[in-house]
Amino acid sequence: MNTADKRDQAHATRNRRALRVTCTIAAMICMAAVACSSTGGKPAPKPSGAGAGQANTPRATVAMITHEQPGDSFWDLIRKGAQAAADKDNIELRYSNKNVGPDQATLVQSAIDSKVDAIAVTMAFPDAVGPVVKQAVAAGIPVDVFNQGKDQALAVGAISYFGQDEKLAGTTAGKRLAEEGAKKVICVIQEQGSVALEDRCAGVKAGMTEGTVDTLNVNGADMPSVESTITAKLQQDPSIDRVMTLGAPIALAAVKSVSNAGSKAKVATFDTNAALVDAVKSGDVEWAIDQQPYLQGYLAVDQLWLYMNNKNVIGGGQPVLTGPSFIDSKNIDTIAELAKGGTR
């Protein structure tokens, strides 16, 4: 056998060995996947929709406490995501809400007193809710924060934060408004005193390189009042060319206000719901900033399950951002399919 033949034979032998090693590793991975299945040694059932197989970990109770304002469909998406994770993780989810800081703090205290296993909470009112979150942590109850409270969550002892950076989201919106030629913007706050909403408007002002941004406070719990207040503002100042709202229901009210006032102002918004899809499609709402509320609810519950069972922390101690991203005429058809399913 000449030297070239010997080299070819050695090369072929190495290839066969490499193939055997690859096949062995692949088989080991498949066996491990089956062994680690949450259904106790059998492959996990094929997911149906957004569902999945249920974990075989001990049953746990998680309290989810938000500042939801009654009638705001945004929170339906939060709850759907949270419930999907709870169903998967063998968790009893107890949801409650109050949109006043001290009242929300009382709900957190009630969760502590009832000895829930973990708490997921929003912190729109950190001065009121923060101290009682510290009490929960001191009592050995793991807590994570979502949706609002990015800058305060870790300081009060929460494991993680899931949501968007509201100032960043506002700045992103302001830059787009400037690029579109907006000169006079009203930023509509539907919940006076909410840190996150104030941060959004502050970000819009920072992002606008030219023009002005004025803040308009409305009562988000009274939609006829919202509509009339925006209408009056537009009638008072016909030079307003953009209405920037901070929630989908407020955006839909603003569309009516523009019509009522005979204004030429265009409407853009933060957050979405199924009804907003048609408004974006028709052009009544120019675009929306999406923070993925379904994902926020899902991650808030799933993080607590991971921590209770394996001390895992998503994000390595840093806020986990779920937004911002734009929904507009370019991608609304894709989003519409998900909105019909109630998850966007």
Image (cartoon, grey):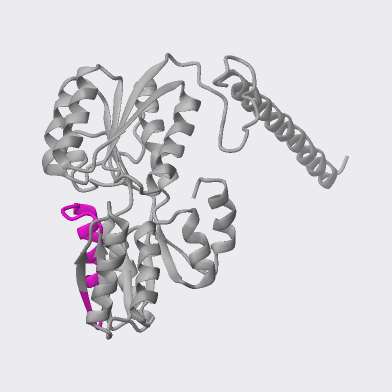
Q: Is residue 77 above or below residue 134?
A: below
Q: Is residue 113 left or right of residue 333?
A: left
Q: Is residue 244 left or right of residue 214?
A: right
Please name the residue shown 18% across and 42% down the image: 100
- Place of residue 209 in the rendered image (x, y in percent of width and height, measured from the top left): 25, 80
Q: Nearer the viewer, residue 319 or 143?
A: 143
Q: Is residue 23 above or below residue 2?
A: above
Question: Could you say which quadrant of the image residue 109 lies in?
Answer: top left
Q: Is residue 326 above or below residue 92?
A: below
Please indicate, yes or no, whether residue 168 appears anywhere in the rendered image.
no
Q: Is residue 51 above or below residue 199?
A: above
Image quarter hosting the N terminus? top right
- Place of residue 267 in the rendered image (x, y in percent of width and height, measured from the top left): 38, 72
Please name the residue shown 64% across and 25% down the image: 45
Q: Is residue 126 left or right of residue 98?
A: left
Question: Could you say which quadrant of the image residue 17 lies in?
Answer: top right
The number of discs equals: 0
Question: As drawn, which residue projects farthest toward the right?
Answer: 1
Q: Is residue 103 left or right of residue 246?
A: left
- Place of residue 253 in the rendered image (x, y in percent of width and height, measured from the top left): 36, 64
- Place of residue 293 in the rendered image (x, y in percent of width and height, measured from the top left): 40, 47
Please name the residue shown 55% across and 21% down the image: 36
Please indicate, yes or no, whether residue 302 appears anywhere in the rendered image.
yes
The reply to whether the magenta stretch includes residue 201 is yes
User: In the rendered structure, which segment of residues is drawn in magenta?
Assistant: 190-213
The reply to whether the magenta stretch includes residue 234 is no
Please name the residue shown 28% across and 83% down the image: 183
